[in-house]
Image: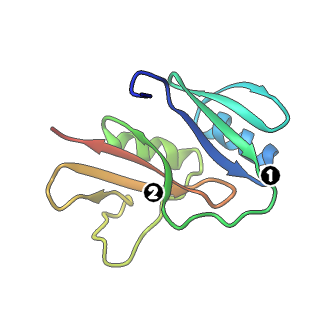
Amino acid sequence: MLGKNDVIAFVPTNDPAKAKAFYSGVLGLKFISDDGFAMVFDANGTMLRIAKAGKFTPQQFTILGWQVTKIETVVKKMRAKGVKFLAFPGMGQGPDGIWPAPDGGAKVAWFKDPDGNTLSVSEHFK
């Protein structure tokens, strides 16, 4: 039924000003509007709504991610903008925070937004 419709992504925030600065200034997403309920960004053709949620507890898993090419380059550029990547004990991540999947099919690096939401960048191989 919805297979041919566009997806809209949602991420909660309790500090819209910090979220706007992060998603536009650090991650480079185009700010579209603020409708009072959420800030709308263009994430390469996907609508991303940073919802003004007030108080909430961030989930302990990834809620939003980007598929990239040359993840090492992307991580390096993000670090230069102040993004801190997460290290998980026992995961076997490299010094750059990138985790190589055991099957060799992907590499992933996780980071948090100003609200503590876990986000990721990943490179997938075919």
User: Position of 55 compared to 61: left or right?
Assistant: right
On the image, the x and y values in percent for residue 76 come to: 43, 46
To which residue does mark 1 refer? Answer: 15
Residue 110: which numbered mark, if any?
2
**Disc 2, disc 1: CB below 8 Å?**
no
Marked residue nearer the N-terminal end (2 or 1): 1
Q: Quadrant of residue 30?
A: top right
Task: Left or right? Give the position of 112 relative to 126.
Answer: right
Residue 85's label in the rendered image is none
| 89 on left or right of 10 | left
Using a 10 Å C-alpha cutoff, classify the residue at mark 2 as few (fewer than 14 neighbours), some (14 to 19) or many (20 or more): many
Q: Relative to residue 12, is residue 66 depicted above or below?
A: above
Q: In which image quadrant can residue 16 be found?
A: top right
Report the label total: 2
Q: Position of residue 124 (x, y in %)?
A: 25, 42
Report how far apart the C-alphas of labels 2 and 1 lie in the structure: 21 Å
Quarter placement of the C terminus:
top left
Q: Is residue 41 above or below residue 65?
A: above
